[in-house]
Every structure is written in C-alpha cells, then in structure tokens.
Image: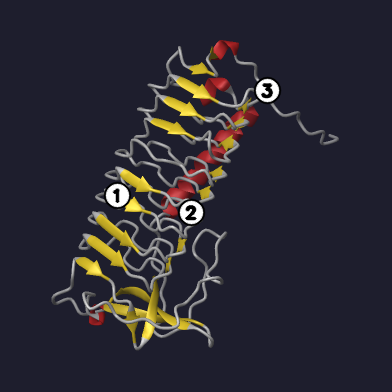
C-alpha cells in the first residue's frame, strides 16, 4: 500500500508541475538575434527545419509593422521568426494572416510564447513559408476560434494551442509526425480534429480537457500515446485496433464521462487509472494477454457491468510482469 501511495503522489506532483508550467513566462529575446533553439519538450529540435530559399509576402497579410521579428537559421539558410506584437497598436488586426516574408527573407515560424495569453486574436492563418510553431506560441489565446495552418509546417511544439477555449476545429498539417505535450489541452470547444496519416506519436495530455471532442480518428501510423492523452475529454468511442499502439498509459481516458467503448485489440498493457471515472463505459477490447494496473483503480468509478473482452471484471485474469530481483 505504501508503494502505491508513493506512486500516486509522484504522479500528482508531476502533473501539477506540468499544469503550472503550461503557459509559463515568455522568454526575453533581442530582435535580430540568431535562433537555433529547441521546440519545447526536450524531444524535438529545429535542426531539420527546411528553411525556404525565398518567399513572397502574401498580399492579404497583415502589415509587418504590427510584429516583432527575430533572425533565424545559419549562414547557409536564413529566415525570420515572429516573436510577438510590436509597439504599434493602432489598427492592430484580430483576424491575422501572418506575413510570409520580411526584409526579403521568408518568415518560417512563431517563436516560443510569442502571443501567449493574448485576448484579442480571433483567427490565424500561417501561409506556405511557415515551418514551425514553438512552445506556448498561442497558449492561453482564449478567443482564437479558427486556425488555418500551412501543409508545409513540420513542427508544432508543446502547449502551442493550449487553452484556446474557443477553437472549434483544426487540421494538423500532413508533415507533422509527433504532437507533443498539451498541444490542444484545455481547448474546450474543439469538436473536430483531423490528424495526419504520418503521425506516430500523441503526447502527454494532448487532448486533455477537450470537453466538446466526441470522436477522433487515430491514424494507423500511430504507435504511442502519452499519459493522460484524452483525460477529461468528451470522447464517446475510440478505436485503436488498426494502429500500432500496444499500451494504454496511466490516466489515458481518466475522467472521460461519456466514453462507452474502447477497441484496442493490439494493446498488451493498460496503465493505472486508465479508465478512472468513465461513468458510461460498457466495453473494452484488448489483447487476451493484456497486463493491467490494479483493476480497482484502473476501472474505479466505472459501471459495475463493464466488460473487458466480453467478460466482467471479476472474471479477468490479472497478468502482471514479474518483479525484478534487486538482490536486496
């Protein structure tokens, strides 16, 4: 019991730190400095960003006078990042088509925390020069209702659109292979998400708190989903059977009060609390040799008649990995 309590405490502390840091302080950078920083959660870098050789500014784009820019790249290929608003406020747009060129160089991305907690933006469009959106770029922009992203974007960092509470739909660009922690966490009005066919990873809390999201099609290419990925979301049914996903991690669907069924025939591990509080859950299909965390916690708050592989919980054989011999 002491070991279990310790594990739960550590998990609680970990999530608390993540939540606290979600829309953290905006970094201070000088305009004109060269940037080669990371994209946010320690697993992704900018080093393979394909900076366009040139770009023409979109004739419908907002005037460059409204933005601050930072030089990005190296001696072989250079572009600009937009780091936030300039001091010009008169006529500042709320529906933004971001400029795609500045000083005859392409604008390739939105910098870390650039528009964090802005309350004026209602719509954004990132054109074909854009390649990356850095960590917390639009985090807390609670009035953004529409996002149009270029198909050429290859990186979206952690918490990029976290707590965009009025965002209703998003099509993740086709070149994105990984979505990192809390990308759309707290987007409580999000009803439609289109994920790219090459996606392999859905990170921690990507759709946490997306209350209006009733369904999402997980591409066959996905092999891993992160802890609490769909926690407290509005998901009603989900199918993972055609994907490469072999594990449902800790708290993955915890608090999904409308979830009724999970089809995951390839899954061989289910983490602690994965279905905690799923009040309407009727059926879960997993591999016949699936390893579970404690059933009493994994399915706590679920209906008593929930079935796993068409069997009641009382008939489920608990398969756990052998404990390691520490020599103690």
Q: Position of residue 231 (x, y in %)?
A: 42, 37
Q: Position of residue 318 (x, y in %)?
A: 65, 19
First along the sequence among labels 2 and 3: 2
The answer to whether marks 1 and 2 mark residues whose Cβ atoms lie closer than 8 Å is no
- Identify the mark at residue 319; answer none if there is no mark: 3
State the residue position of label 2. 180
Q: Report how far apart the C-alphas of labels 2 and 3 lie in the structure.
A: 31 Å
Q: Report how far apart the C-alphas of labels 3 and 1 lie in the structure.
A: 40 Å
Quarter of the image for the C terminus: give it.
top right
Q: Report how far apart the C-alphas of labels 1 and 2 lie in the structure.
A: 18 Å
Q: Residues within 10 Å of mark 2 (few under 14, many from 20)?
A: many
The answer to whether marks 3 and 1 mark residues whose Cβ atoms lie closer than 8 Å is no
Quarter location, residue 238: top left
Furthest residue toward left:
91
Q: Is residue 299 left or right of residue 293?
A: left
Residue 277 seen in the figure: no
Quarter of the image for the N terminus: give it.
top right
Quarter location, residue 191: top left
Q: Secondary structure at mark 2?
A: loop
Q: Is residue 32 left or right of residue 144?
A: right
State the residue position of label 1. 169
Establish if 30 lies above or below 143.
below
Residue 158 seen in the figure: yes
Q: Residues within 10 Å of mark 3 (few under 14, many from 20)?
A: few
Establish if 35 lies above or below 313.
below
Closer-to-camera residue (210/177): 177
- Identify the mark at residue 23; answer none if there is no mark: none
First along the sequence among labels 1 and 2: 1
């Amino acid at each position: 019991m002491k070991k279990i309590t310790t594990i739960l405490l550590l998990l609680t502390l970990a999530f608390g730190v993540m939540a606290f840091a979600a829309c953290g302080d905006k970094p201070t950078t000088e305009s004109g400095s060269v940037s080669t920083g990371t994209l946010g959660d320690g697993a992704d870098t900018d080093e393979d960003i394909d900076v366009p050789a040139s770009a023409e500014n979109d004739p419908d784009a907002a005037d460059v006078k409204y933005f601050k820019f930072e030089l990005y790249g190296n001696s072989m290929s250079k572009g600009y990042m937009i780091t936030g608003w300039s001091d010009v406020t008169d006529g500042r747009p709320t529906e933004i088509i971001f400029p795609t060129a500045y000083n005859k160089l392409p604008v390739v991305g939105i910098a870390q925390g650039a528009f964090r907690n802005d309350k004026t933006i209602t719509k954004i469009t990132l054109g074909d020069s854009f390649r990356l959106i850095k960590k917390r770029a639009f985090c807390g922009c609670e009035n953004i209702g529409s996002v149009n992203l270029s198909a050429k974007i290859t990186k979206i960092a952690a918490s990029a659109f976290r707590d965009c509470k009025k965002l209703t739909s998003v099509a993740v660009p086709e070149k994105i292979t990984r979505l990192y922690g809390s990308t759309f966490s707290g987007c409580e009005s999000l009803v439609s998400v289109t994920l790219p066919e090459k996606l392999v990873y859905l990170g921690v809390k990507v759709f946490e708190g997306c209350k209006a999201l009733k369904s999402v099609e997980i591409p066959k290419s996905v092999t891993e989903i992160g802890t609490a990925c769909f926690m407290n979301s509005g998901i009603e049914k989900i199918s993972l059977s055609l994907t490469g996903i072999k594990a449902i991690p800790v708290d993955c669907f915890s608090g999904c009060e409308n979830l009724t069924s999970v089809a995951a025939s390839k899954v061989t591990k289910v983490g602690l609390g994965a279905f905690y509080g799923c009040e309407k859950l009727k059926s879960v299909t997993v591999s016949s040799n699936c390893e579970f965390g404690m059933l009493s916690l994994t399915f706590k708050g679920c209906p008593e008649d929930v079935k796993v592989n068409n069997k009641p919980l009382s008939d489920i054989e608990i398969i756990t990995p052998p404990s390691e011999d520490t020599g103690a």
